[in-house]
Structure formats: C-alpha cells, structure tokens
Image (cartoon, rainbow, N blue to C red):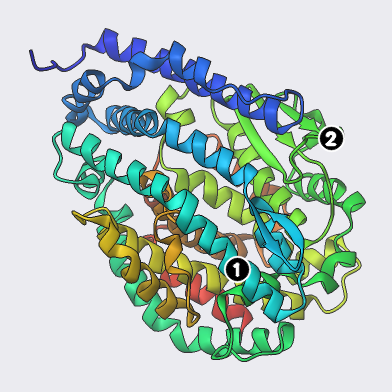
Amino acid sequence: MPPAPPSDRELDAYREQADRFIAELDEEFYLHYAGLKETFDLAPIYERHKNLTELDQVKSIGLAVNGGARVRELWRFACEGYFGELTRDHAEKLAELESELAVSVGGEEIPYRMVRPALANEPDREKRRVLDERANDLLDEHMNPLHLDAAERVQRGTRDLEFANYLELYRKALPSSALDDLASQCRTFLDSTERLYEEWADKLFRTRVGVSLSEAERWDVPRLFRAPEWDPLFPADKMVPALEGTLIDLGIDLSSQENVTLDLEERPNKSPRAFCAPIEVPDRVVLVIQPIGGPDDWRALFHEGGHTEHFAHTSRDLSMEEKRLGDNAVTEGWAMLLQHLTDEPAWLTRRLDFPRPNEYAVEGATGLLYFVRRYAAKILYELEFHAAEDVTTMRGRYAELLSDALKIEVAPANYLADIDSGFYVSSYLRSWAFEAQLRAYLMEKFGSKWFANHEAGSLLRELWGEGQKMRAEEMLKEVTGSTLEMEAVAERVREVLR
C-alpha cells in the first residue's frame, strides 16, 4: 500500500522526535570533539531514531510538502537523513581510512589528515608537489571507490523516492533562488571578477610564494594562505577577550549569558579548532575553544561566535523547524559577519595593536575573492554532477570548471570528495552575499564602526531572535529592502582592493 500523507498529530510527533535526534547528535559531537569522551558513538543514536529516515516515512512526509515551508523543511530533513543512513557505512569507513593512511615523503610519514597543514608549512615547492601528488594517489586508490559507491547509492535512493535524480529532488526541496537562479548569478560573478581576481591573486602569489598566478600550482595554495608573519599579531591570550569586548561594544555580555557555555579547558583530545554545539536552541549553546593563536584561529573563533550568538538569541517560541532547520545561509551569514571583523582595519585598530591593517585587509579581500570564485564554480559543477547518469564522466568537468575559476589546475581526483550533501555550497555562497549586503546596511545606518554601536547590537539581537524562520532572501528584503545579489560580494571586495 502506498504511503498516505501524515496527519497533523503524526507530524507533531515526528517534529518532537527529530528535535531529540538532532539534540543527541549535537551532544555527542560536543562530548567527543571537546575531548570529554574518547569514542564517537553515532550508531546508537541513529538506531534509536531509525524510523525518522525510513523510505515510507520520507515518502509520506513528501506528500504533505504543499502544506507550507515548515513541512518542506521536515521533508528535506527526512530526505537528508535517509541518504545519510544509506551512506553511513561509507562515511565511517572513509573516516577510518583518513585516520589510518599516511603519505611518505623523504622518509617522513605524514598522516593523511595532516597533509594540508603540512603543505601550508612546507617552504620547499618540490616537497609540496610530491606531498600533494602522493596524497591524491591515496585519495584515488583508497577513498574514491567508497565515494563513488556512496554517490551511486544516493542516486538509487533518489529514484526510490520517485525523482529522476538528486538535482530534481532538491529543486522541490529548495526554492530556485538557492539553485538555478543562484547559478546564473554565479556565472555573472565569475565573469565580472575575473580581471580583478587575476590582478590581485597574482600580486599575492608573487609576495607570498614567489611565483606569478600563471606559474602557481595547486600545492602552492595552502602555502599562500598560511602567512605565518601575521601570527604574532593574533596572540592566543587575546582571542577570547577580543570576542568578549566586541560583543560588549554591541551591548552583549557573553559572560552573563546563562544559556551559553564557554568551554575553555585544555584537554589532550580536544579539537584545536573552535566550534559551536547548539544542543538545545536557545537554552544550551556551547562554544568550544582551545586557543592556539594566529589569524586562522581568530577567524574560526569569531565565525563560531556568530553561530553561538545567533542560536543563543533565537526565540524559544519558534517551531522546531525554525530553530533547528531552515535556511543555513542565515546562520552562516551571521557567522561570516563576525568572522570578517578580523579583516576589518577599523576593528583591528580598536582591538589590537595592529600595524599595517590595510595591507592585511587587502590579503583578506583577495582570499575572500578566491574562495567565493571557487564556490561559484563548485555550484555549477554540482548542478551538473547531480544530474549526470554516470558520475564518473564528471571527473574532467570538475577540473575544467574549478581550474578556469581559479586559474590554477585543480586535482581531478577530488571530483567526488569535494561535494557536500544537500547542496550546502548554496548556503555558503548565499551567506557571503547576505553578509556583504547586511554589513553595507549596518555601515550606512550606524557608521563605519557599527560593530561598536549598541543600537546595531539591538538590531542584531532582534534579527537573531528570528532564528531560521525566514530564508536569507526574505530577511534581507525585510531589513534592507534589497534582493540578495552575489555581485554585492564583488562590491565588498572592490571596496578594499581599489
């Protein structure tokens, strides 16, 4: 018998269980990556809640999708859980391989997961080349067969849900502004910023790596963004005080937020990178920090601080979908807003004894342009990938699209690994535009030092209170009257690179 649409009572029960499922996952993630628990035990959580992602359950909720945005979010959650269950064994095996494999270079064994930091810290170009090529060989030999099998399982699962392919399913799960319309904007963005990118990326490569953009290779990129000379200007002991001071300037006392836990303790197995665990939104949000220092560590802290304040201010009166699901471009936008302060000359001057802040801002803007162009090419690739009957034919297309965007040859072996589930690439792209346009509005309304204005803080708290009830496009329209435009990111970059 085919599934029937769920009743309102059944939907409410599903919401309640989904809420507990997500909370348990976030709790487990926090305990393990904060170094409080050695094992990472996802299987029991998935087993307790396996009915959430069963095929008939997903189909049933899909029949109610025309009931509004909340039901659509539940259905998208169910689909992603269904695909996650189909590929959970692959994810576990991939994680195991990544932790076990190592690259041998010059008699030194480098763990696979440490290849990128090793590339960033290796001054010898030839050693970087060898390290990169051997890492890609491992990816092709050991991981890509698993990635490919997982992709094919998702394809079959999509057909079991009665869609022609993954792209068609997401055209139902997401509005066109998140996929096809965004892709059109990304093509324009790539065209409009090509010369700007070539000019400034060339300057940065010459300064940082000693080669021109036309001479640069993919193994030079991690080295380009490492920039160790800036490390002393971003000391570990000033990270948390800088975040606390920034929030105080906005009228927010982090230390008195009873629903926010700052996990500052040092533990041997604690993640070196800051992260946010919104275990109960908004009643228990954990910001985990083990300060190391350096620009990347500061960026990560402020990014996760943006997520933390968003979730901590979310109204508890919202529905589960509006608190826990919704458009992730919104929370990523708030994270970007705080993160990008660490590239802002006025903020650097206010918070740190910082020489040459404008020079640092130029490097930040060039880096932003690199990453946005990369993701703009990535969404174009993923739209094609998820419509392809045989994804192995996409290997060359991946290299073509991304290499053209970056003017550097990328590794074709990454054509499977460089894909996030659920078109999350769209959330990142739209969050950059959302942030650029909101920042422009904040500067116009509150001045260039909006980040030190209590009225700006009041507006942010009000918007954070909306959780993810609105999509990024809707919130931007309500606040600024503008439509979301990728070209706003180009304008944000040009403002610095004039």
The answer to whether any part of residue 449 appears in the image is no
Left or right: 301 in relation to 168 = right
Residue picked out by circle 2? 268
Q: What residue sits 26% from the left and 63% below the top?
A: 393
Identified at 42% across, 72% down, the residue is 402
Q: Residue at x 72, y 25 (%)?
A: 38
Q: Which residue is mark 1?
A: 132
CA gap, disc 1 and disc 2: 29 Å
Left or right: 6 as drawn, with respect to 113: left
- Mark 2 burial class by Cα count in 10 Å: few <14, some 14-19, many 20+: few
> Relative to the observer, which residue lies in front, 363 or 154?
154
Compared with residue 182, is residue 211 higher up or lower down, i.e. above or below? below
- Find residue 203 and report its image quarter: bottom right
What is the tally of numbered marks visible in this picture? Answer: 2
> Callout 1, which amino acid?
Asp
Residue closest to the eye, 106 or 204:
106
